[in-house]
């Protein structure tokens, strides 16, 4: 709740030497350079040219620092121009992916139990706004966002660790499948076809499209059921 407790206007008295945005930027720079585990109150203080004790006047502890980092790194949400829910949600999911790929450590912070900050909640709002015309209940819409984010974050984690995971896997398996294709015929065939049609590493679009196919099917099924009972 730390981010929601911040005053909206300027406090009376002397202007603070540091801001939460400045502290977040210093911590984000460390995480981008060295990884999330290297972010400590001491290192952030050193980067800002102050002491750890002075930093505690702005950020009470590591949990609050993580919250500031996550909310700042997420930034303002992508708001699609498309009016239809399907391209709008594709743009939203792609926006989440692109933002997380800029700071892959976001994945760990997003998946920890936490209260969303103002910017993260704005992403919720944008995603739900894209579904205004969808005849789903509120809980179902939230579940859909969770499903999309889960797919996106899984890909970000894989790509951060191996660059292009499907291409890396194909390269690692190439010599194995070349001499053992008779033992793994379906696997060998799938990788060969993926190589021929250039479909590898399209997991983001493919996964989101299949999720949205399921939503479209559910909406159509409910509409048909409603018509048959009227």
Image (cartoon, helix red, strand yellow):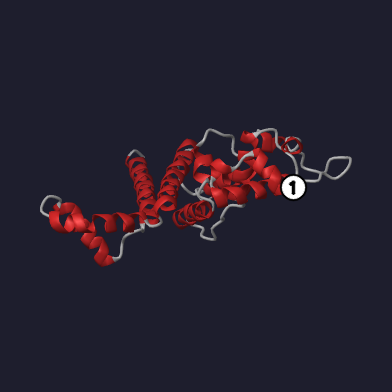
Which residue sits at x=63%, y=46%?
27
Q: Residue 126: tell me if it is visible.
A: no
Find residue 100 and report its horizontal and vertical position in percent. 51, 51
Q: Is residue 73 above or below residue 12?
A: below
Q: Residue 37: tell me if it is visible.
A: yes
Pick the quarter of the image with the C terminus: top left
Secondary element type, mark 1:
loop
Find residue 191 and report its horizontal and vertical position in percent. 23, 58
Q: Is residue 174 above or below residue 36?
A: below
Which residue sits at x=31%, y=62%?
199
Q: Is residue 119 above or below residue 170?
A: above
Q: Is residue 150 left or right of residue 71?
A: left
Q: Residues within 10 Å of mark 1 (few under 14, many from 20)?
A: few
Q: Is residue 35 left or right of residue 50?
A: left
- Pointer 1: what residue? 49
Examine the image and state in which quarter residue 39 appears: top right
**In the foreground, 50 or 11:** 50
**In the foreground, 173 or 94:** 173
Q: Is residue 215 left or right of residue 182?
A: right
Q: Is residue 150 above or below residue 53?
A: below
Q: Is residue 153 left or right of residue 114?
A: left
Which residue sits at x=63%, y=48%?
72
Find residue 118 and report its horizontal and vertical position in percent. 64, 43
Find residue 141 and report its horizontal and vertical position in percent. 47, 41
Which residue sits at x=27%, y=66%?
197
**In the foreground, 142 or 223:** 142
Count of all numbered marks drawn on residues in the image: 1
Q: Residue furthest left?
A: 182
**In the foreground, 35 or 150:** 35
Pick the quarter of the image with the N terminus: top right
Q: Residue furthest right?
A: 13
């Amino acid at each position: 709740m730390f981010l929601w407790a911040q005053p909206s206007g300027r406090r009376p008295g002397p202007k603070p030497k540091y801001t939460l945005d400045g502290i977040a930027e210093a911590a984000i720079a460390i995480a981008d350079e060295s990884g999330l585990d290297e972010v400590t109150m001491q290192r952030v203080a050193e980067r800002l040219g102050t002491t750890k004790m002075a930093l505690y006047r702005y950020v009470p502890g590591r949990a609050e620092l993580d919250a500031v980092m996550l909310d700042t790194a997420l930034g303002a949400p992508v708001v699609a121009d498309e009016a239809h829910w399907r391209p709008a949600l594709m743009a939203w999911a792609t926006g989440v992916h692109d933002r997380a790929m800029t700071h892959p450590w976001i994945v760990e912070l997003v998946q920890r139990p936490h209260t969303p900050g103002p910017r993260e909640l704005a992403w919720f709002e944008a995603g739900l706004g894209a579904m205004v015309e969808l005849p789903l209940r509120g809980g179902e819409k939230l579940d859909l966002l969770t499903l999309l984010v889960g797919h996106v974050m899984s890909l970000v984690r894989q790509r951060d660790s191996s660059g292009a995971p499907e291409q890396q896997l194909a390269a690692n398996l190439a010599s194995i499948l070349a001499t053992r294709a008779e033992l793994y015929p379906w696997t060998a065939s799938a990788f060969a076809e993926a190589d021929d049609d250039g479909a590898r590493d399209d997991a983001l679009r493919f996964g989101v499209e299949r999720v949205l196919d399921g939503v479209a099917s559910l909406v159509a099924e409910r509409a048909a059921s409603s018509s048959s009972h009227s």
